[in-house]
Amino acid sequence: MIPKNRLILLLILTILLCHVFPVVAANNQKKLLINNQVINKHLNIKEENGALLIPLKVLEDSFNLDIEWIELIKSINIKLDNKIVKLRVDESKVQIGDQVKELSTPVRMTDGKVYIPLDFIAQILGYKLTWNTTEINLSKPSVQVNDVKYKKTTSGEEIIIYTNKRPRYDIASLQSPERLAIDILDSKLSNKLRDIAVNNGLIFQIRSKQFKTDVVRVVLDLYQPLSYQVDINKVKSGYQLKLKLSPRIIDFSYNKKEKSFSILATKELGTYNVKSLPKDNKIIVEFPNVLLDIVKDHFAINNKWVDEVELVQVEENNNIVAKLILTTDKLFKLNIYNDPKNAKRLIIKPNRLKELLDVNYNPKEASVNIVTKEMVSPKSIPLKKGARLVLDFPETIFRKVHKSVEYDEKFIEEVRVSQFNKEVARVVIDLKELVNYELNTIKDSESEHYNTVVKLELPDDKDNKELIDTLNSDKSQQLQQRRDINHSKDENLKTNRLEDVNIVTNGNEIELNVSLENKSKYKIRKFSYPNRLVVDLPQTINELRQESIVEPKGIITDVRVSQFSWEPAVTRVVFELPYAIDYKVTSKSLTDQISIKLKTQSEESVLSNRTIVVDAGHGGADPGAIGPTGLMEKDVNLDIAKKLAALLRQAGATVKMTRKDDRYITLWSRADMANRLDSDIFVSIHSNAHKGKDASGTEIYVYPGSYGDTLVLAKLVQSSLQKEIDLIDRGVRFNELYVLEETTMPSILSEIAFITNRKEEKLLADPDFRQRAALGLYKGIVAFFNRVAKEER
Ligand SMILES: [Zn+2]
């Protein structure tokens, strides 16, 4: 029995309490189910503002939790695996470990009973909460997401999500920034996954997180929209949800020598259709379901057959199609095949042979004239045996089956023409004896045909006499030599030998070196059609094998060495040039080291007329990040910046540095300098830092939402840095950095390596490494301007 006065007091209290709590707060009973098992049939619960609160006692029993009630301050401590959750009665804030969060409803206490907000408990314990008027359901997600990977296989690129059970999913494409969200429904991330830096030109990273209590979200941060197919496979360890990326065309190139186009894709391109549009003089190769992922899509080719090439992406009947469009003067067939060395490369070769029309001999000029419909550069092979001169015309067809003309001349016996193989027409000139000759191609302005003129230098020819005179003043020696070469090959006799042919490139300069066994005179001449530089070495035998001769380098497109003639012995070295180039002979007239300097416009000349601002991060009072042994970021940045500036200047660029010494410069004035100079690009150099000492690698930052040139610059610099310093590729990332935001030109911020990582600090301290880093930045910048220059043309 309760005494009457106390009963009245209780009544008053109840009324008061009813005023304190909103009317929506009500007590009722519901059935509680955890993972579909009935835990409590008549659970007393409280509802407040649409949220459920359950008694602390029930929570403790049902979930087997370690809960501490501190009466004095009306607080609850819940011990979870690795942190403590602290709640207080009527307090809307909750402390989880060292974080503070807001509750939807505070903990309440009525009649000495403590009620806990169920949504919060479900969240921290990883349960999904659903309820209706009679039931409360708490259930753990049934699918576990174990791993997410990006794989590049022969069959293409895939993003694989590994789960224990068959996953249900939603995929949404999100914009600004461009990304794809894959939601795995009713799932839990089994452990925290690292972000994956992909940086394949399409996806720059993959992030995975527990998006909601029962949804794992995998986000692909993209450079551009994605095309893909989804596949679910059952495997031994569970299931794989695969996002198979449609093949992408990632490179297009034109091989001038082969006159072929090549398309590089992320996987083998199996299907394509070729169409011709005779009216527009266009040939089109269509690749269904292929994504175009190249920076440049328009190429001026301007060879004899193809004026230009365009690559376009179109959508036809809800399918994407990549198209290669060739604009040409005349339609022709294409040979299309996979590169035998790399199936992902597709070679497209116009099948349009040139035509050899006729051959004739001009006795007056002592020249054989070979008429072709198009410009062809034949390869000439003098054969001592049988005294023959063989001329091979590549990619040429001779439609008459055979032509043979006999001449009853003093020096020439017969000229024969035949189709040597499918693509080579061969002209053989049978001589009485092998003589010197010169090859020139002339365009006949009337017929528009080309004449390859083989001018034989006959023994009584004045020019030839002069050559022979310079070569051999002593007639007896010449006779002696003839005997040597033909019969004995005696080492003691004075016959020179070609020892080496070398090309040295240094910035803008190219030096051609020819080394001989003994000192000798020599003759250097320049020819056109095709452009070449010829070095004739008298009294010299060529014993160098073609494969031991230096590979073409710089602008030199080909190097050939041949025994031009035997009597007298002349070895000829030919350097093929892309265009007429001035040269200067720097060696003495009698030497065993012939040296020729070419005045070229090398690749780097794309940097002349360019202004580049190089920004060494931090400085002065701001040391930047500091490494474990005390190396300061500001010093590393400055040294790399100086080295980069030197490389750029050497290649002809105008370089301004935001600082040249150890001083403090505001971020504003760094960006302002670049803007005032109307600089072409802005390159900021930094060294990275992270709390975790293991963080490592190279990354480039661009301002969020950057596109076009900035992104191209970033990607090219990142990949060339990668080649030079070979650290972990962390890719191109977006970050709202002041200097990137304020500069008005393409601007990037490079984090070369982590100064906070012991290993990388050691690298950053090494001058050689800094030089390589500078070189990596430099090469990326050159590649960028090369691309820009091509587009400007
Ligand atoms: Zn920094």
Image (cartoon, helix red, strand yellow):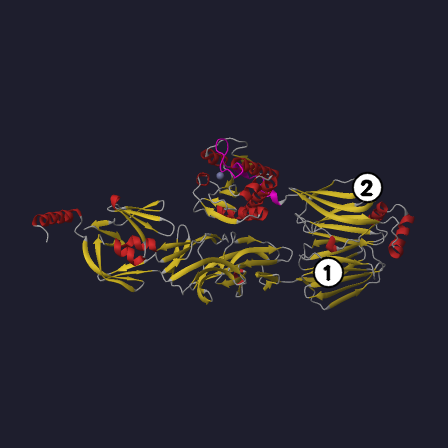
Name the chief secondary structure element in magenta: loop
Residue that sits furthest to the left in the current view: 4
Residue 629 covered by magenta stretch = yes
Residue 382 covered by magenta stretch = no
Left-right relation of 672 to 784: left
Left-right relation of 165 to 693: left
Residue 356 coordinates in the image, percent (x, y):
70, 62
Magenta residues (range): 603-632
Q: Is residue 683 visible?
A: no
Residue that sits furthest to the bottom in the current view: 401
The quadrant where residue 426 appears: bottom right
Q: Amino acid at mark 2?
A: Leu
Q: Residue at x 74, y 55 (%)?
A: 546
Q: Residues within 10 Å of mark 1 (few under 14, many from 20)?
A: many
Q: Residues within 10 Å of mark 2 (few under 14, many from 20)?
A: few
- CB-based contact (under 8 Å), mark 1 and mark 2: no
Residue 135 bears which disc, if any? none
Left-right relation of 14 to 385: left
Q: Is residue 380 visible?
A: yes
Secondary structure found at label 1: strand
Q: Amino acid at mark 1?
A: Asp
The residue indicated by pointer 2 is 590
Quarter containing the N terminus: bottom left
Q: CA distance from mark 1 to mark 2?
A: 35 Å
The residue indicated by pointer 1 is 392
Question: Which callout, 1 or 2, points at the residue further toward the start of the chain?
Answer: 1
